[in-house]
Structure formats: structure tokens, C-alpha cells
Amino acid sequence: MKHVPHPQAHYVYMVCCVNGTLYTGYTINVERRIALHNAGKGGRYTRSHRPVSLMATWTFNSKGEALRAERELKRLPREQKLRVAEQMRALEGEGS
């Protein structure tokens, strides 16, 4: 029997730091990444601005797609980032 690998999901996530700033990153395991941020072992910025709370996640089929989306999100002004995160939460709420 041939092993068919499952496609790896790639995620972009947005967190809110304790000081109210937003941080956007890439991962293949959101829960683990948030735990690392809150343990002080995540990104350099979040080490001194924790705890962080997850605001939104986006799923992609490839690392390249996810990294492009991360880059685009990081370029947005804060208000637009908040709007995009809110839209994602609203969409997730519809699926419940």
C-alpha cells in the first residue's frame, strides 16, 4: 500500500500583545506557536510584549501563499488589520 502524504496546512495568524499592538506571523501549528509566544520563546517582539491573545488565523495550501499573505497583512495600517481580523472572526462565526 502506497503512503499518500496529506498536504501540510500553512497558517498566518494575528495576535494582540498585552500592550495592544498587533503581531502577525506564519506557522504550521497555531496552538504551539501561541504557546511559544506566551512562554517568551516566540518572535523577538512578542518576548517583551506578552501575553498575546489570538485574534485571527488564515489557512493556506502552500508556504509560499501563506508568506505572501503574511507580508501583505503586515503592510496594512492598524485599522485595516483590525477590520480584516474582525471579518475573519465573523466568517468563522457563520460556520458554527
Image (cartoon, grey):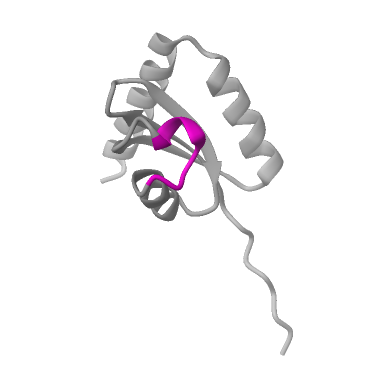
Quadrant of the rendered image containing residue 47: top left
Q: Quadrant of the N terminus?
A: bottom right
Q: Is residue 7 magenta?
A: no
In the image, farthest residue toward the bottom: 1
Residue 28: image x %, image y %?
A: 54, 52
The residue sitting at 45% across, 47% down in the picture is 41
The residue sitting at 43% across, 18% down in the picture is 81
Q: Is residue 46 magenta?
A: yes
When the figure is inspected, residue 50 is found, relative to residue 87, above or below; the finding is below
> What is the magenta range?
40-47
When the figure is inspected, residue 47 is found, relative to residue 78, above or below; the finding is below
Left or right of 39 in this view: 12: right
Residue 14: image x %, image y %?
A: 42, 32
Left or right of 31 in this view: 59: right
Quadrant of the rendered image containing residue 16: top left
- 51 or 86: nearer the eye? 51
Quadrant of the rendered image containing residue 52: top left
The residue sitting at 35% across, 30% down in the picture is 49
Residue 24: image x %, image y %?
A: 48, 30
